[in-house]
Image (spheres, grey):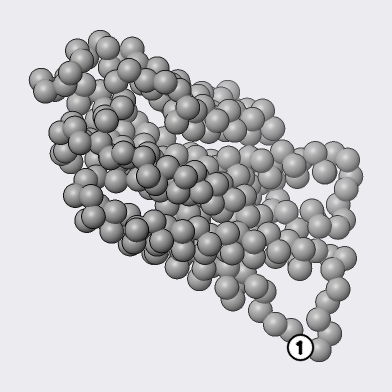
Amino acid sequence: MLPFMLTLCALVLYIASGALYGANLFIEAPTAPKNQVKPTPLPVSRFGRPLLFTGAFVQFVAIGAWCVTTHKSPFASSFGSLSVLAWAIALAFGILETRRRLPAVGAIALAVTSLVLFLALLQARNPVAKTPLLIGQLVSIHVLAILASFGLFAVSTSCAVLYILQNRLLKQRRHNGLFRKLPPLETLDRTAYFAVAYATPLLTLGLVLGIIRTFGTDLPHPPGVWLRDPHTITALFTWLLYLCYFLSRLLLGLRGVRLQYLLILGFLVAISLYLIPTTTHHFL
């Protein structure tokens, strides 16, 4: 009950923080009414960032409480795995937020965080895996590295969505109003690139550790069955998509909207892991 309540509290904090990041766009819009009496700090700088980090801390405590209560890794249930994924997305954006101010990215990233955490709460009553396969640091690092990479990919996807929107508005010569405060294309492109640059090595580490684990002698399936599993194939395809992103940009010199669509496609393929059936990656 305590992990559930703490997770619910974190969800409320994320929603409030995301709402403030979104509201900041309206408050800073060029055509918005100005405060003529006394200038006040923007809602994001006053409350948005503290709510974000408070939510991340509360969720961290919730994950720890779940582990203490169940005596299991958080990855032993769909609730725990989705909760860690939501925490990774929030933390990835929180670190980004300390370096550059991108409220529009925060509005999208925290909306995704809230959705993932809501889905986690819906599965809070699902059974907890009891298999010994989840015991050990290798498996925990394997899953944590992959989920951390997904958190960074979510941030890059948020930037890609705003890039496409901003690019379309610029082509339509719509420079005024609310969307005038969207980040410049160069800033969005650079932020997305660096997020993927950190995420791809984490995904690589997770995949390598997973492949190493498939050759363990205590597994119920031979290595070939694990490597042919839809989850493994999808994860490798995700890795290839982001590798194509780097090759297209660094070797072919491609820029612009096409690369942003590739980032969105990569993230959609990544999160499809939660929907694709598997014969090996279930531990109940």
Q: Nearer the viewer, residue 73 or 48?
A: 73
Query: Image quadrant for the C terminus?
Result: top left
The residue positioned farthest toward the left in the image shown? 217
Q: Nearer the viewer, residue 250 or 65?
A: 65
Q: Residues within 10 Å of mark 1 (few under 14, many from 20)?
A: few
| Residue 260 appears left or right of 72 | right
Query: Image quadrant for the N terminus?
Result: bottom left
Q: Amino acid at mark 1?
A: Lys
| Residue 284 appears left or right of 136 | right
Query: How many numbered marks have been drawn onto this rendered protein structure?
Result: 1
Q: Residue at x 15, y 33 (%)?
A: 132
Q: Nearer the viewer, residue 42 or 258?
A: 42
- Residue 12 % position (x, y): 53, 62
- Among the 4 quarters of the image, the one containing residue 163: top right
- Residue 116 % position (x, y): 50, 45
Q: Decide: is 36 above or below 74.
A: below
- Residue 159 % position (x, y): 61, 45
Q: Residue at x 66, y 41 (%)?
A: 161
Question: Mark 1 sits on what residue?
Answer: 38
Q: Residue at x 70, y 82 (%)?
A: 40
Q: Is residue 282 visible?
A: yes
Q: Label 1, secondary structure: give it.
A: loop
Q: Is residue 198 visible?
A: no
- Residue 63 % position (x, y): 32, 54
Q: Residue at x 22, y 56 (%)?
A: 68
